[in-house]
Image (cartoon, helix red, strand yellow):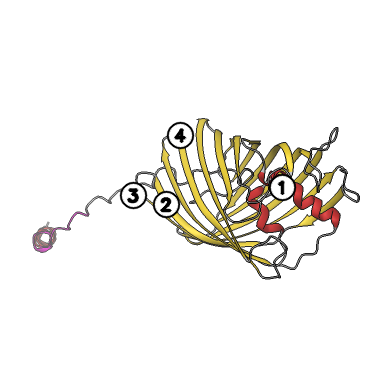
Amino acid sequence: MRSWPTAALLSSCLAAALTTPARAERPPPEPAPRPPPGLEAQGPPPAPGLSHRGIALDFEYTIAAARATDVTSYQPIAGALAYAYAARLALEGAVVKRRWFLGFSNQLAAASVPAGTTPGTGGNGVVAGNPEIWARGLWVSRVGLAAGGGLAVVLPLPRKFSPAAAEVVRAVREVRPWDEPHFQDLTLTARPFLDIRHVVGPLTLQLRQGVDVAFHLRTPAEGENRVDLAALASAYAGVEVYAPVTLGLELFEVYQLTEDVSSPSCLAPCDQHRVQFTLTPSVRLAWRHVSPTLSVLLPLSTPLRAEVASYYAARLHLGATVDLP
């Protein structure tokens, strides 16, 4: 029996193996870069997280009880409380992933105000706010530090307030003084701001500094400036004590730089009622797509313009995010 075909086949396979170059081994793939710590960290409840993904939807509802003062004398109205309500809806989307964002918000306010000594005062009413739009950018480092800023604009709408609506505005802007530009007649308000955030483990620190520049496009009222300036600042600290529970504390300041804040008890020029500090402790439940928050607003100083003697308020905030491909 002849076996030369088998020998020839083995010799040809051996020659092919010797002449074929060895296949180079591929280097192991490099590990994917780790995302910066705290990329999904939540900030103060009224606003979405600085570096959120996709589209952020925020709904905020505030209810407050205040010791109202008379429209003319600014004296507290004995034996009666004013009740104020405000609902705000905000929508913000990422134009460039976690870098550039565009946002829009609007709100609705209502109040029930007791009648004072001035005839024709008091009553109930509902007032819609002026819409606000903004654009902002953000830079995030690998160590958890984020910084950025932007520009918001409150659009000027013609407003004619009835006496009841004017009482609503008077009550709501004391509880939420940072929202005063939303309830002004034909006033264009530019709101540049800067943001800083740092995340260390379960702790989130966030600061915002801004200024409101209000241009009154109508004829200024008596004692009103053509342009008014107001400074705003907030400092927030949040600690994730146990997932998903986060305890937060925010200090908010509003300082009217040029607006007339005089009253019968503090004649112009009056600086006594020019600044307001609000302390806001909060409890948040933070999941991936939904984060409800309950907080309390506590005034640490006399309310601006002394249009109410004092107040206390509670706020419910619901934030949600939607991922985009």
Rounded to the nearest angstrom, the CA distance separating label 1 from label 2 is: 40 Å
Q: Nearer the viewer, mark 2 or mark 3?
A: 2
* Residue indicated by mark 3: 33
Q: Which residue is the site of mark 4?
A: 202
Q: Do the residues labelled 3 and 1 touch (CB within 8 Å)?
A: no
Q: Which comes sooner in the sequence, label 4 or label 3?
A: 3
Q: Earlier in the sequence, mark 2 or mark 3?
A: 3
Q: Which element carries disc 1, helix, strand or loop?
A: loop
Q: Which of 207 and 290 is in front in this view?
A: 207
Residue for point 48% across, 43% down: 206
What residue is pinned by disc 2? 147
Residue 314 x, y percent position in the rendering: 70, 37
Instruction: Name the residue: 70% across, 49% down.
Output: 173
Provide the residue span drawn in magenta.
16-26
Q: What residue type is labelled 1?
A: Ser
State the SS at label 2: strand
Whether tag 1 and tag 2 are in contact, CB under 8 A, the answer is no
Residue 183's place in the image compared with 40, above or below, is below
Camera-near label (4 vs 1) is 1
Amino acid type at image mark 2: Ala
Q: Residues within 10 Å of mark 4 (few under 14, many from 20)?
A: some
Nearer to us of marks 4 and 3 is: 4
- Main SS of the magenta part reads loop
**Within the magenta stretch, is there residue 17?**
yes
User: In screen coordinates, is 124 left or right of 188?
Assistant: right
Q: Residue tagged by mark 1? A: 263
